[in-house]
Image (cartoon, rainbow, N blue to C red):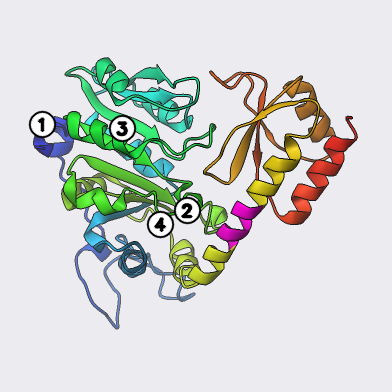
Amino acid sequence: MEIDKLIRTNIKNLRPYSSARDEYTGEAMVFLDANENPFNEPYNRYPDPLQRKVKEKIAAIKGCEPSHIFLGNGSDEPIDLLFRAFCEPGHDNMVTIDPTYGMYQVSADINDVEVRKVKLNPDYSFSADALLEQADDQTKLIFICSPNNPTGNLLDKSETIKLIQSFSGLVIVDEAYIDFAPGASLLTKLNQHENLVILQTFSKAWGMAGIRLGMAFASPEIIRIFNRIKYPYNINMLTQQKALELIEQVADKNQWVDLLIDERKKLAAELINFPFVVKVFPSDANFLLVKMHDARGIYEFLVENGIIVRDRSKVVLCDDSLRITVGSTEENRILLEKLNELI
């Protein structure tokens, strides 16, 4: 893949902003380069613009090199950067599955990029050929989410690989929920496919949604492009510090994942027994998509009782369905007890 043929001309010719902390590596005793206040340490100093220490820890856990990692303000930042780097507004397009995570559409709309949606099969599987049929010379990006949101299912790996191998642009695989589908990540395929971009997050399995830290894994060439156009200090010092602390708690993360997978099974088994539940769809994520009679009414009943779930009834292929996050044992008990009142 020739990245020069994909990248926007103005981005290719961009002279990126060089922050004070970009211009040296190593340790320093006196900082007189960035016009910072010398008082109120350590918060008076700008953070590392490339988050080197955080990337080193992530690389060790993920089994890749730091040069393959971009860190963003959630996964939403690299999603937006992909459009800004590779799609000419009003000219290029992207292809994605439907239904899926809504931020692909939002970022495309913000960047004036046409979105071509390919409806999933009734069982929520997808066809690489169907996506490729929608692509043309102006298609720069194809987005898929696996496990998919809101359907919860892991997408077929062979179809995904076929898509990557057959498409001349970038294929973005969003693995936000991959920790709940052990052994399914495509990270091991990263070195084999220069057009593959993988998105992951600390918001789900790691329990760090509040610190807003997302990851993109790609070839060093693509990562360099992201770094050219991101804001200079996109990950603040507090987020970096907390990430360094929490990444050490791998055992806790693994325990949480095991507990949530167990709770997912139990919750699914309980929900299907309610007379108003039509189907509980299989899930490889930390949530369940549940088809119900009068889903909107049940949603409003739960909200009135202080229980917040997501009404997905108006989403294609998700008619009369609620998306229910798998909570703690106590949270799930409260949900089930309240639903019992409807019988």
Label 1, secondary structure: give it: helix
Residue 251 vertical placement versus 218 (above, below): below
Residue that appears at 43% across and 59% down? 236
Callout 3–callout 4 Cβ contact below 8 Å: no
Residue 336 placed where, x, y %?
A: 81, 42
Is 261 colored magenta in this rendering?
yes
Residue that appears at 68% across and 41% down? 268
Label 4, secondary structure: give it: loop
Q: Earlier in the sequence, mark 1 or mark 3?
A: 1
Depth check: give the residue in front, 193 or 211. Answer: 193
Label 2 sits on what residue type? Asp
Q: Mark 2 — residue?
A: 179
Quadrant in the rendering for residue 340: top right
- Mark nearest the camera among 1 and 3 is 3
Mark 1 and mark 4: Cα distance apart in space: 30 Å
Q: Mark 1 — residue?
A: 5
Which residue range is magenta in the image? 256-262
Residue that appears at 35% across and 32% down? 143
Depth check: give the residue in front, 128 or 62. Answer: 128
Q: Quadrant of the C terminus?
A: top right
